[in-house]
Amino acid sequence: MTYSAIGIDRISMYTPAYFLDIRQLAVARGVDPDKFTIGIGQDQQAVIPGSQDVVTMGATAALRMLDDIDPDRLGLVILGTESGVDASKAGALYIHDLLGLPHSVRCMEIKEACFGGTAGLMTARDYVAAHPDKQALVIAADVARYGLGSGGEVTQGGGAVAMLVSSNPRILELDDDTCVYSGSIQDFWRPVYTDEALARGKYSTEQYLEFFEHVWLDYAARTGRSASEFAAFLYHLPYTKMGAKGLKRLFEITEVCDEARSLLEERFNKSIQYSRRVGNVYTGSLYLGLISLLELDDTLQADDELVLFSYGSGAVGELFTGRLVEGYRAALYSEEHAAILDNRRQVSVEEYERIFNNVAPYSPQDYVADEKYFCGSFVLEGVEGQERKYKRIG
Ligand code: COA
């Protein structure tokens, strides 16, 4: 089995059409805006209306790559999420239906906090290694909700990243040298009766860095490779300052010359730009960072190698590497993504709070989504008799 030419063939993202200025949120909460923009590292936060969930956002992100999906080759559809819409049925099935995908594919949902998307990507890679002619569609989608006025409110957001995985990919070849570190800890969790997460924020931050240290030192010991050999380090970004702490930790535990260090810092800075505007996409955050780097950086070249660090609370950390493919820029959706981000409407804190409170409830009652906030290509119209009703609008 060889992994050398398996990886991400296409990568597409979606985030809803509304955002909140993080400075306005700070003022409304009586916090110095510099804490949110500098201390946390965010500028804006995606506001997710009731018509949008991991299904609609995931389907909208994947719709763009439909022409590249070969119905005879597609074998797997995986949704990685920690904000799924059902405790039993895989959200991948709703997406499969909305996109009109063939019935001859496996559909499943993977949950492990912000690690679910990576678990999906690794599963897809192994699947294609076993079936080289096949394609797999992996969607990492989440709505990050902590609650109005909560400590985690500044680290909310939402969106989806869809990745098509195949042999001879056009964007990033994934290597087979991943290092994993797993251990049951209680840093972040969400009981099944609520849609708002519980977090021990400071503890989670420490554990993220500990897990990163474990996997990087393991990787360096096993491969003998040094950080300076890589063109960029990409981090899971629950908020961008978290990734900055990860890069800082790398420089503390490994020798990196000044030149390599400034290049890694420069590229890290490119990788956080989309997240600064979208906020937390939980399991999609690492991949939003990858898209941001690839679309905003014009210095990377074919064969440059990237390090990706995935962290899902609970917790699993995985570090893996990939190599850029000749001509990768032509396979990106740079213009479409810029338009998605630039064409969003800013909402006030009051409007954000109204939108936040008008979502399908965690109870059996019916729900009708407000049409005023319909966006993307698919919407949740509502919940009727405890069944979700989706439709295509664009
Ligand atoms: N100007 C600039 N920076 C400021 C500031 C100001 N006026 N006021 C505070 N800061 C800095 C702090 O020094 C701190 O920086 P540091 O982390 O480098 O030390 C940072 O802002 C955050 O301040 P802190 O007081 O630690 O924030 P907090 O108690 O509000 O907690 C989180 C921040 C991220 C822990 C909290 O929002 C949270 O729990 N989020 C959810 C947890 C999460 O995302 N977990 C997933 C991890 S994978």
Image: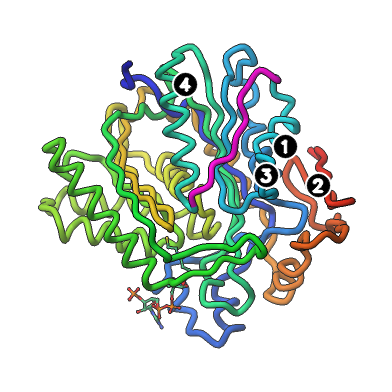
Q: Which residue is mark 3?
A: 88
In terms of depth relative to the viewer, which is nearer, 120 or 338? Answer: 120
Decide which of 225, 337 is in the foreground and name it: 225
The answer to whether mark 4 and mark 1 are in CB contact below 8 A is: no
Q: Quadrant of the N terminus?
A: top left
Q: Are marks 2 and 1 in contact (CB under 8 Å)?
A: yes
- As drawn, the label of residue 51 is none
Residue 212, position as x, y percentages in the image: 28, 54
Tell me how far mark 3 sits from mark 2, CA to CA.
Answer: 13 Å
Q: Earlier in the sequence, mark 2 or mark 1?
A: 1
Above or below: residue 338 compared with residue 122 = below
Dot 3 or dot 2, earlier in sequence: 3
Residue type, label 2? Arg
111 in the magenta segment: yes
On the rendered image, what quadrant is the C terminus found in? top right
Residue 94's tag is 1
User: Quick check: 372 left or right of 222?
Assistant: right
Q: Is residue 276 left or right of residue 179?
A: right
* Disc 2 secondary structure class: strand
Q: Do the residues bearing badges 4 and 2 touch, measured as CB atoms within 8 Å?
A: no
142 w.r.t. 208: above or below: above
Closer to the chain start, of discs 1 and 3, is 3
Q: Quadrant of residue 91?
A: top right
Badge number at residue 388: 2
Q: Residue at x 72, y 37 (%)?
A: 94
Q: Which residue lies under the disc numbered 4?
A: 166
Q: Earlier in the sequence, mark 4 or mark 2?
A: 4
* Mark with earlier residue (4, 3): 3
